[in-house]
Every structure is written in C-alpha cells, then in structure tokens.
Amino acid sequence: MSPETTRVTTAVFRDMKRRGVKISMLTAYDYPTAFLLDQSGIDALLVGDSLGMVVLGYATTLPVTMDEMIHHTKAVCRGVQRAMVIGDMPFMSYQVSVEDALRNAGRFLKETDAQAVKLEGGREVAEAIRRMTACGIPVMGHLGLTPQSIQQFGGFKVQGRGDEAARRIIEDARIIEEAGAFSLVLECVPADVAGEITRSLGIATIGIGAGADCDGQVLVTNDMLGTFERFTPRFVKKYADFAPQMREAVRRYAEEVRSGAFPGKEHSF
Ligand code: KIV
C-alpha cells in the first residue's frame, strides 16, 4: 500500500473531525463499484442494508438477512484498498438480545474484512454498542429516520422536529457516544438539530438529509449515480443520470445483435 492508500481507520475519522476535514461516505454492495469508488478517493464505504431496496428489489430494508450482508460485504472488501468498510447490521440481527448482537457484529469482522459495523437506534441499543466496543468491534450509530423502524414511523419522514423530539435525539446522540461508538449517522434530521449534535459530540457525525454542519456526508450510490429510479428522496443530489444511458446502450446492443451488426470482424477469432 502506498502512502496515498493508507487505510482510513477510526483514528482517521477522529483526526478528520478534530481538523474540521469533511468525511465522504457512499454505499457499495459489490466488487466493481467498491473498486471504482475507492479509486475515486471516497473515505468510507457503507455496505448498507439499503442493499435490500436498491439491489435486491425489496420494498423496504426489513427482509435483508445477515447472510446477504456478509456475502455483499465480502465482495466490497475485495475491491477496496483505502476506504473504511462498514457493514450494516440488518433488521433483527441485534434487537433480540445483546448476545445475538455481539455474535452478528462479530461475523462482519471474522468473515469479511470490514473494519466496523453500523446499527440503528438510540438508548435501546446502547448496551449492545458497549459490549461490541468492549470486544474491539468499532460501531457507527444511526439516529433520525432509521429505515428499519419504517413501520413504526408510518413512512419516510423527517425525525427530531419539535422541541421534545429534538431533545430526545440530542440525548440519544450523547448516549451513543458514551456507549463507545466512533461515529454517528444522522438521517433526515433538521439541519439545526444535526448541527447542535455535531458541535456537542467528540465523534464524527455523518449526515444524510441532515444539513451541511455534519462532519461528513453519506448518500446511497445508486441514488447519486441515478441507477435507482423507483424514488429519489429530496436530500439526494444526482451527480450522474446513468439509467437512461444504460437503457440506450442496451437498446443499441440488442438492435445490433438482431441486425447482425454485432459482433464485427474485430470481435471475432
Ligand atoms: O442502508 C443504508 O444505506 C444506510 C445509509 C443510507 C446511511 O443506512
């Protein structure tokens, strides 16, 4: 590994927060995408359970299993040299008991080359975070619109609006930090609340729909590259619009196969 490819670790996250250097994070679910994103200088890759929606075609993230997460995390790790890889703990892999949570978090570090795990929730997951970090498993928290609680929220809605909800989320953030998390995702939280949390914590906050004051930003790669068209949340900025280009490329290929224009002499032996 050359100096430019020195691995991003939890210590690097801490240092970036201290120096005010913003952290860039995207999701990845497969080897070729992880390879390209890592080469492009992304700081962290989250193998998100958004896998269920943008890759596996489920309506929510709830059906995703540990085995699916391990399978995709292994593929991502094979493509990465520099970025930190974080495996997302799927629904019901950490909620039933702390023992379950520990065993499943351990699978990410034992069976893949992921450096950390992420889990959703506030005070109710603090004990699990405490046990994981005590065992040497770095944990990223996730507060706000936590998609595994979508049935309880009744839809994809901004969380932490109003004094009482804001106070609770700010308290939860402090509890997650005290439990030992090295970083915290804030999803769909009012920008002023996310800013207050970011200023009050020593660990890095990573925002998604949480304004510009977070220590870093994360987006779902398929959203920002325009390859997932079912819906696009308001907080997404599309940096490319590849779906129409993919359709056009495939249309031309199919047409050329039908017409005999492909393969040409140069593609034949
Ligand atoms: O699963 C996921 O992709 C996530 C990010 C959106 C933070 O949790």
Image (cartoon, helix red, strand yellow):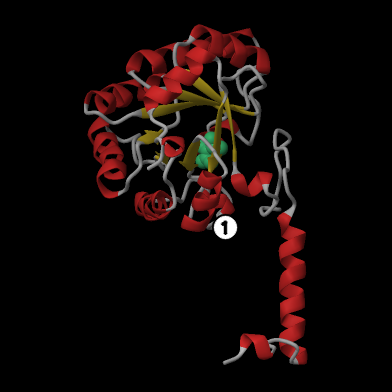
Which quarter of the image is occupied by the N terminus?
A: top left
Q: Residue at x 49, y 40 (%)?
A: 45
Q: Residue at x 35, y 37 (%)?
A: 115
- The one of 159 and 197 positioned closer to us in this rendering: 197
Establish if 223 lies above or below 16: below
Horizontal and vertical percent position of residue 260: 74, 92
Structural crowding at the residue carrying mark 1, measured as other residues with C-alpha within 10 Å and reported as few (<14), some (14–19) or many (≥20): few
Establish if 257 lies above or below 202: below
Toward the front, the furthest residue is 2
Q: Residue at x 66, y 18 (%)?
A: 190
Residue 90 appears in which quarter of the rendering?
top left
Q: Amino acid at mark 1?
A: Gly
Q: In the displayed structure, does residue 219 sit left or right of residue 32? A: right
- The one of 2 and 166 positioned closer to us in this rendering: 2
Q: Is residue 199 at all visible to an observer of this figure? A: yes
Q: How many marks?
A: 1
Q: In the displayed structure, does residue 269 sit left or right of residue 234? A: left
The residue that label 1 is drawn on is 57
Residue 218 appears in which quarter of the rendering?
top right
Horizontal and vertical percent position of residue 265: 67, 91
Q: Is mark 1 within 8 Å of ligand 1?
A: no
Establish if 207 lies above or below 240: above
Horizontal and vertical percent position of residue 153: 58, 31
Q: Residue at x 74, y 89 (%)?
A: 258
Q: In the displayed structure, does residue 232 sit left or right of residue 102? A: right
Which quarter of the image is occupied by the C terminus?
A: bottom right
- The one of 263 and 75 positioned closer to us in this rendering: 263
Secondary structure at badge 1 equals loop
Q: In the displayed structure, does residue 72 sit left or right of residue 25? A: left
Q: Is residue 168 at all visible to an observer of this figure? A: no
